Image: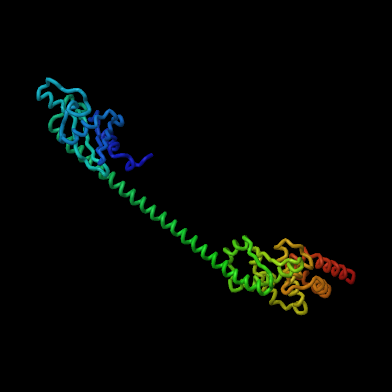
Amino acid sequence: MLLSINIPEHELVVNFIQNSLPQAPQLFCIAHYPNGAIHVQTGEGEHTENEIDSILNFITKGTSGWYSLSETPFSAMQQIGQTSLEMELDRDYLFIKGISTTNCTLHLLIQLKPYGITKEKYLLAGQKKQFEVSIKGFITSLLTLIHADRTILMNIAKGALISKNELHETKAQLLQQNQNYETAIKQFIQLIINKLQDKYRISIHMSQDFIESLKHYNQPFEDLEENLEKHIQIELNLALLQDETEITLTQHHLTSLKNSTAINSNNAENELQLGRHEKTYKLLDRYETAASLAYQKGIAIIGKNIGLHCIPAVTNASITDALNKQSKKIYDLFDKYPKKWPIIRTEFRSIANIVEKENLRRRETA
């Protein structure tokens, strides 16, 4: 449904008079536009049988007052042989000329008849004068309200447009800031990579998921170079074994090794008096951190891969030797801390074998 301010004024005026004046059986609302166009609206809709020249002549030369239909452009019949009194009584069309609107000038031609219980056939002079004043006042007030509503709506629309433009501008600024931030981060990372490439003499590339993850990186940037270097040391060990000369960084290389170590070294447990088990405790933490990194890459949790992910890297043989020497303490620590070291406890077969052997030995000696 259209708002009234979106309906042409000549249609609104006709609807208003029809609904307000039962005394008006017929009316014509002539809209004259600055470009010369003329539009006529009646109670039945648009009046298309227009004699443009005669209508233009009528609204130009005519004056406000009362007319018979035959004196207007809307009748082809002429009244002949009437007396002056008869002619005056037949003038029941009120012509109101020159009502200005926002985009055109309106001219009203309204037929008015006695209405209600009166048996009079014609309006009296006093009644005509009253209609002249009242109708023009009503129409002028109606158009004033329409103009005010249109102004309010335009202001609202302008406000909405301004808000929309401001929102669009803000989004564009945020996008630009994000792009600038992304560019700055990539340049910063590239400087680190260039330094590490020179140091380790290996080509280092950034994958797309690594670049995307950089946008959401929330760790301290002062630790980033040290963290990447530790990851690259691990990758370098793997690459050398496979005779590769390139490393591609993925999102898991942004995982903080410092945080991984912290996770595996609970502060409350560090405060415990581990005594002769302290060295073994730290060894298990180290292997768990290395296993976690291998697990993230989908690499098998075996001695060789754990050794390559230790910092610094160690051999599989040294891991086997350390586990054999610390088997009793490992058993004690696993028993004391059942929720610690979940990856190597369940995935690293070498430790599982040691725990099983130590368990069997203790049952036999019990």
Indicate the quadrant where residue 336 lies: bottom right
| Image: 297 above or below 74 | below
**Where residue 177 appears, x then y in whole percent?**
49, 64
Looking at the image, which is closer to me, 225 or 292? 225
Residue located at (69% from left, 77% from top):
271
Residue located at (27% from left, 28% from top):
49
Residue located at (26% from left, 40% from top):
35
| Image: 333 above or below 145 | below
Q: Is residue 165 left or right of residue 320?
A: left
Indicate the quadrant where residue 326 lies: bottom right
Looking at the image, which is closer to me, 163 or 125? 163
Q: Residue furthest left?
A: 84
| Image: 195 above or below 12 | below
Looking at the image, which is closer to me, 18 or 187? 187
The coloring applied to the image is: rainbow
**Where residue 132 appears, x then y in whole percent?**
17, 36
**Where residue 363 appears, x then y in whole percent?**
87, 68
**Where residue 10 appears, x then y in whole percent?**
28, 37
Q: Is residue 218 left or right of residue 165?
A: right
Looking at the image, can residue 84 be seen? Answer: yes
Q: Is residue 5 left or right of residue 66?
A: right
Please identify the quadrant where the C terminus is shown: bottom right
Residue located at (77% from left, 68% from top):
241
Please identify the quadrant where the N terminus is shown: top left
